[in-house]
Image: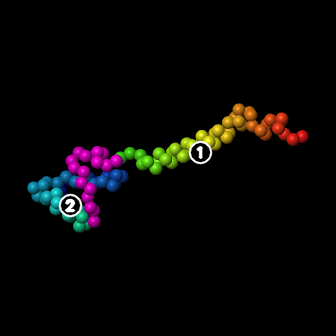
Amino acid sequence: VLRSRVRFSDKELSITFREEQLALRGLVELLRKIGYGPQLTGEGARGRGTKRGVPRTLYIRLGVAGFCFGNIMLFSFPEYLGADVTSDGSLARG
């Protein structure tokens, strides 16, 4: 193994090794033996094999929050425009 780089934020380990000294199969078996089964992506495949981006659940949460915000704002429109029932004297009982 010539070099290894760990990216903890992405839970990713990049390993550079010499195939003359250690076969890929041997490296995979060694990693599995210590409890880390690899997912091979190949050289320069960063971002191509894995889906990196915003999770779908985050978009759903943002949509629900936007809907709730809009709904509450529509309920408060009459108050902003001065057309609320409490300030209008015509509907008050005398």
Q: Residue furthest top?
A: 81
Q: Amino acid at mark 2?
A: Val
- Screen quadrant of the N terminus: bottom left
Q: Residue 32: horizontal and vertical position, in percent?
A: 24, 64
Residue sitting at 26 percent across and 58 percent down? 38
- Give the labeled residue for mark 2: 28
Q: Which mark is residue 55?
A: none
Q: Which residues are magenta?
A: 35-51
Which of the pair 85/9 is nearer the observer?
Answer: 85
Residue sitting at 75 percent across and 37 percent down? 84
* Element type at mark 2: helix
- Cα gap from disc 1 to disc 2, whole angstroms: 50 Å
Q: Residue 58: horizontal and vertical position, in percent?
A: 47, 48
- Quadrant of the rendered image containing residue 11: bottom left
* Element type at mark 1: helix
- Screen quadrant of the C terminus: top right
Q: Amino acid at mark 1?
A: Cys
Residue sitting at 55 percent across and 42 percent down? 66
Main secondary structure found in the magenta portion:
loop
Sequence-earlier tag: 1 or 2: 2
Q: Residue furthest bottom?
A: 33
Q: Which mark is residue 68?
A: 1
Circle 1 residues within 10 Å: few <14, some 14–19, many ≥20 = few
Relative placement, left or right, of 7 versus 62 is: left
- Quadrant of the rendered image containing residue 85: top right
Q: Residue 60: horizontal and vertical position, in percent?
A: 49, 47
Q: Residue 17: horizontal and vertical position, in percent?
A: 17, 54
Q: Is residue 11 magenta?
A: no
Q: Residue furthest right?
A: 94
Q: Is residue 46 magenta?
A: yes
